């Protein structure tokens, strides 16, 4: 037991010079530990809030003669940079903080989707001609993983 006490004493840092106070050093180290723990905890807690998938519910109107409305849901996978609409996966998507852009090949026709993330306004184009436009919102909480 005596040998263990001697080894611990030798491994301990040198005591401060005579008259110097240990209190400011302990306070600084304690504050640093608290900061590191708080930063680590905030990083860990923030991660689950940003889900890989976002579910959008969209109602868009045709620009054709009938002006019919279409309602559909879009699943956006932010990590894989993909979108899925009606069971069809997109070609690689461009997903940024401001917009979502992707294309889907349906029976040989390429449908280009562009959704503004701030306003929710979106368009579908074929060969640079807008065929549908409308609004998208986050889907109800039952489908939400955010």
Image (spheres, rainbow, N blue to C red):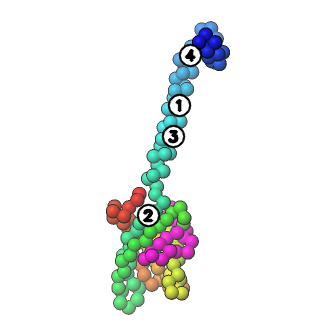
Task: Please give the residue where the numbered disc 1 appears in the rendered image.
Answer: 33
Calculate the distance from the C-alpha at mark 4 to the C-alpha at mark 1: 17 Å
N-term-proximal mark, 4 vs 1: 4
Q: Quadrant of residue 28?
A: top right
Task: Please give the residue where the numbered disc 2 appears in the rendered image.
Answer: 54
Calculate the distance from the C-alpha at mark 4 to the C-alpha at mark 3: 26 Å
N-term-proximal mark, 4 vs 2: 4
Q: Quadrant of the C terminus?
A: bottom left
N-term-proximal mark, 3 vs 1: 1
Estimate the x, y position of residue 119 in percent, counting from the top left: 41, 67
Between 75 and 21, the residue placed more toward the observer is 75
Task: Please give the residue where the numbered disc 3 appears in the rendered image.
Answer: 39
Calculate the distance from the C-alpha at mark 4 to the C-alpha at mark 2: 52 Å
Between 128 and 6, the residue placed more toward the observer is 6
Answer few, some or many: residues within 10 Å of disc 3's Cα (few below 14, many 20 plus, some between 14 and 19): few
- The stretch in magenta equals 82-98
Q: Is residue 94 visible to the viewer in this orientation of the structure? A: yes
Calculate the distance from the C-alpha at mark 3 to the C-alpha at mark 1: 10 Å
Q: Is residue 85 magenta?
A: yes
Estimate the x, y position of residue 55 in percent, counting from the top left: 41, 66
Q: Is residue 29 left or right of residue 141?
A: right
Q: Quadrant of the N terminus?
A: top right
Give the total of numbered labels: 4
Helix, strand or loop under label 1: helix
What residue lies at 40% left-to-right and 68% top-to-bottom?
Answer: 56
Circles 4, 3 touching at the beta carbon (< 8 Å): no
Q: Could you say which disc has been placed on residue 22 in the image? A: 4
């Amino acid at each position: 037991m005596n040998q263990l006490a001697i080894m611990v004493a030798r491994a301990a840092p040198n005591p401060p010079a005579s008259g110097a106070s240990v209190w400011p050093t302990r306070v600084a180290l304690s504050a640093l530990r608290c900061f590191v723990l708080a930063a680590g905890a905030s990083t860990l807690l923030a991660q689950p809030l940003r889900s890989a998938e976002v579910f959008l519910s969209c109602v868009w109107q045709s620009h054709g003669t009938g002006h019919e409305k279409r309602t559909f849901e879009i699943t956006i996978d932010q990590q894989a940079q993909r979108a899925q609409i009606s069971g069809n996966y997109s070609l690689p998507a461009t997903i940024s903080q401001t917009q979502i852009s992707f294309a889907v090949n349906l029976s040989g026709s390429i449908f280009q989707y562009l959704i503004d993330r701030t306003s929710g306004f979106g368009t579908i184009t074929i060969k640079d001609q807008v065929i549908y436009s409308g609004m998208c919102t986050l889907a109800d909480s039952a489908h939400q993983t955010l």
